[in-house]
Image: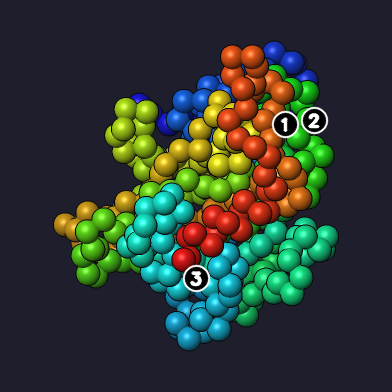
């Protein structure tokens, strides 16, 4: 099985048939594997290259400088082997992930006061000097893409195109810059760059590079399949809240980041640009009207989006 590739550019067409064709491909992808590679997304390649460059510059800084930005789980610098993503799926005491990261929370959370009282603001690196302006530019583009993906989703689920608008006008969004260093020492048994997990909220927007040791997704047959990087594209996957919202019609699928082959020589360092999106923090997520019926009752009770996110983050860093 392969990850489907969908050109979403025709969704901007005035022709309803073009828009519906994209929506049907969307529904098929997330009903089967829970992942899609998208072309025609509209984010300039030059901007993504700039984000990649400033992230590499940050992770190359001294450890003491990076640790000065260490924040609570889900915010600021996350030290190497600090996260244990497999724990978020009830895996018990999972091995630590072979990754370091920097998390930037969505600015709408700050402006609208949606974060818990006393929660710290973003922790921005001073070096490189262009870091914040570059990240802000990318987040604005990815935020707009996230809104487009929800319009596609509404049509795919048999809803009015603007259905998710009231749920996403203050869309939760967190940018995670993930750096997977070279592995000088062999990983422990069962240890990965990221352990197997699902994402927690809505769609994840991923820009991956072509370095060894990349993303894998669990197929319906139980095999781990690679998600190959394709120039000019992004990888999208659906998270737990979308699976709950669609009453299991769409899959929040297990995935992991594998280790590079030990026989490789030279650099195997990898960098991923990950944008997590989700409904407004105070949105109540419950079964959609088109995803239940007399023979398919709702499987999940309502849950507040922000509460669910915080619960999963706490499990990850327990």
Residue 96 drawn above or below residue 285: below
Q: Is residue 13 visible?
A: no
Sequence-first disc among 3 and 1: 3
Q: Which residue is mark 3?
A: 78
* Dot 3 crowding, Cα within 10 Å, few <14, some 14–19, many 20+: many
Tag 3's secondary structure? strand
Picture residue at 77% right of the left edge, 60% below the top: 114
Marks 3 and 1 in Cβ contact (< 8 Å): no
Q: Disc 1 vs disc 2: Cβ atoms closer than 8 Å?
A: yes
Q: Residues within 10 Å of mark 2 (few under 14, many from 20)?
A: some
Q: Which residue is mark 1?
A: 151
Q: CA distance from mark 1 to mark 2?
A: 6 Å
Question: Helix, strand or loop at disc 2?
Answer: loop
Circle nearer the N terminus (1, 2): 1
Q: Is residue 60 visible?
A: yes
**Percent position of residue 118, x then y:** 74, 74
Q: Position of residue 279 (x, y in %)?
A: 71, 45
Residue highlighted by disc 2: 162
Residue at image x 61%, y 22%? 297
């Amino acid at each position: 099985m392969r990850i489907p590739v969908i050109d979403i550019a025709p969704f901007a067409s005035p022709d309803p048939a073009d828009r519906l064709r994209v929506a049907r491909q969307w529904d098929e992808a997330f009903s089967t594997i829970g992942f899609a590679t998208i072309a025609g997304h509209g984010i300039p390649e030059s901007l993504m290259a700039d984000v990649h460059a400033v992230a590499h510059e940050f992770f190359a800084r001294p450890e003491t400088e990076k640790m000065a930005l260490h924040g609570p789980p889900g915010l600021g610098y996350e030290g190497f082997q600090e996260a244990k993503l497999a724990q978020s799926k009830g895996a018990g005491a999972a091995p630590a992930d072979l990754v370091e990261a920097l998390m930037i929370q969505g600015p709408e959370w700050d402006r609208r006061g949606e974060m818990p009282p006393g929660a710290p603001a973003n922790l921005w690196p001073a070096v490189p000097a262009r870091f914040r302006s570059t990240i802000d530019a990318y987040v604005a583009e990815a935020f707009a893409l996230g809104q487009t993906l929800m319009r596609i989703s509404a049509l795919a689920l048999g809803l009015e195109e603007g259905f998710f608008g009231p749920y996403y006008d203050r869309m939760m969004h967190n940018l995670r810059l993930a750096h997977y260093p070279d592995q000088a020492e062999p990983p422990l048994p069962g240890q990965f760059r990221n352990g197997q997990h699902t994402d927690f909220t809505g769609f994840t927007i991923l820009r991956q590079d072509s370095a060894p040791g990349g993303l894998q997704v669990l197929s319906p047959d139980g095999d781990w399949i690679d998600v190959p990087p394709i120039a000019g594209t992004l990888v999208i996957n659906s998270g737990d809240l979308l699976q709950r919202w669609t009453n299991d019609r769409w899959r929040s699928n297990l995935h992991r980041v594998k280790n590079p082959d030990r026989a490789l020589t030279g650099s195997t360092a990898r960098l991923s640009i990950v944008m997590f999106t989700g409904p407004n923090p105070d949105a109540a997520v419950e079964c959609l009207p088109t995803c239940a019926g007399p023979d398919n009752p709702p499987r999940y009770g309502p849950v507040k989006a922000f509460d669910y996110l915080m619960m999963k983050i706490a499990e990850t860093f327990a």
